[in-house]
Image (cartoon, rainbow, N blue to C red):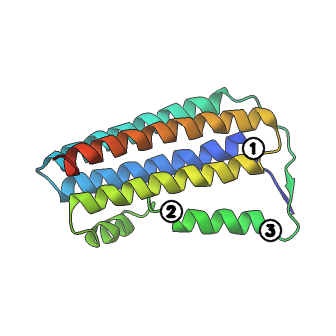
C-alpha cells in the first residue's frame, strides 16, 4: 500500500487534536469551577482554538500536493497512526472526555493529564515528520512541533504557579 503522507496530513491531524483538546479543557473548566485552575482551563480552551486557527492557516498556505506517498505494503503506518490516535488523551467523543475527567480527582491531576497529552502530541508529530519524504513538509511539521513545544512550556509554567508555589 502507498500511504500518502505529507505536511497537509499532519496539519489535518493536528487540527483534530486541537478541537479535542479544546473540549477537554472546557469540560475541565466546568468540573473544577470556581477556582484558579478552572480559569486556567478556560484560557487553555481558548488557546486550543487559537492553535486550531493557526494550524488551519498553515494548512491553507501549503502548496497543492501531488499524489504520491510512502510505500507501506503491510499497512504498518496506517496501523500505527490508528493506534496512536486511539491512545491520545484528547478524545473526540464528549462522553469519553467526561469519563476521563471523572477518573481525575483534582485539578492538578487534570492538568498533569493535559501536559501528558501535549507530550504525546509532540512525540506523535515527530514520528509524522519522520514519515514525510519531502524536506519542505518536514520544515512545516517542525513549525507545528515548535508551537506545541511552546504550549507545553506554558502549561508547565502555569502548573508550577498553581501547584508548586512555596
At a point 70% along the width and 46% down the height, the residue shown is: 129
Element under disc 2: loop
Which badge, 2 or 1, is on the more N-terminal residue?
A: 1
Query: Which residue has dot 3 on it?
Result: 75
Of residues 70 and 120, the one nearer the viewer is 120
Q: Quadrant of the N terminus?
A: bottom right
Q: Where is residue 45 shown, x and y percent of the image? A: 33, 44
Residue at the extreme left = 34
At a point 82% along the width and 38% down the height, the residue shown is: 134
Direction from residue 132 to residue 140 in the image, left or right: left
At a point 33% along the width and 38% down the height, the residue shown is: 46
Asked if the residue under mark 1 is in contact with the one under mark 2, i.e. CB atoms within 8 Å, the reply is: no
Which disc is residue 6 wearing?
1
Mark 2 burial class by Cα count in 10 Å: few <14, some 14-19, many 20+: some
Spatial separation of the CA atoms under disc 2 and disc 3 = 20 Å
Number of marks = 3
Query: Which residue has dot 2 on it?
Result: 88
Which badge, 3 or 1, is on the more N-terminal residue?
A: 1
Which badge, 2 or 3, is on the more N-terminal residue?
A: 3
At a point 52% along the width and 50% down the height, the residue shown is: 16
Spatial separation of the CA atoms under disc 3 and disc 1 = 16 Å
Q: Where is residue 49 shown, x and y percent of the image? A: 40, 39
Direction from residue 34 to residue 81 in the image, left or right: right
Element under disc 3: loop
Amino acid at each position: 500500500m502507498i500511504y500518502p503522507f505529507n505536511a497537509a496530513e499532519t496539519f489535518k491531524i493536528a487540527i483534530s487534536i486541537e478541537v479535542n483538546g479544546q473540549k477537554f479543557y472546557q469540560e475541565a473548566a466546568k468540573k473544577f469551577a470556581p477556582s484558579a485552575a478552572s480559569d486556567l482551563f478556560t484560557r487553555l480552551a481558548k488557546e486550543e482554538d487559537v492553535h486550531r486557527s493557526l494550524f488551519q492557516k498553515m494548512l491553507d498556505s501549503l502548496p497543492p500536493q501531488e499524489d504520491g506517498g510512502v510505500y507501506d505494503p503491510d499497512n504498518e503506518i496506517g496501523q500505527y497512526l490508528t493506534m496512536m490516535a486511539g491512545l491520545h488523551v484528547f478524545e473526540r467523543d464528549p462522553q469519553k472526555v467526561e469519563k476521563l475527567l471523572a477518573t481525575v480527582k483534582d485539578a492538578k491531576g487534570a492538568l498533569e493529564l493535559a501536559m501528558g497529552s501535549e507530550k504525546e502530541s509532540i512525540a506523535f508529530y515527530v514520528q509524522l515528520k519522520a514519515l514525510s519524504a519531502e524536506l519542505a513538509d518536514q520544515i512545516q511539521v517542525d513549525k507545528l512541533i515548535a508551537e506545541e513545544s511552546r504550549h507545553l512550556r506554558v502549561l508547565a509554567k502555569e502548573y508550577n504557579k498553581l501547584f508548586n508555589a512555596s
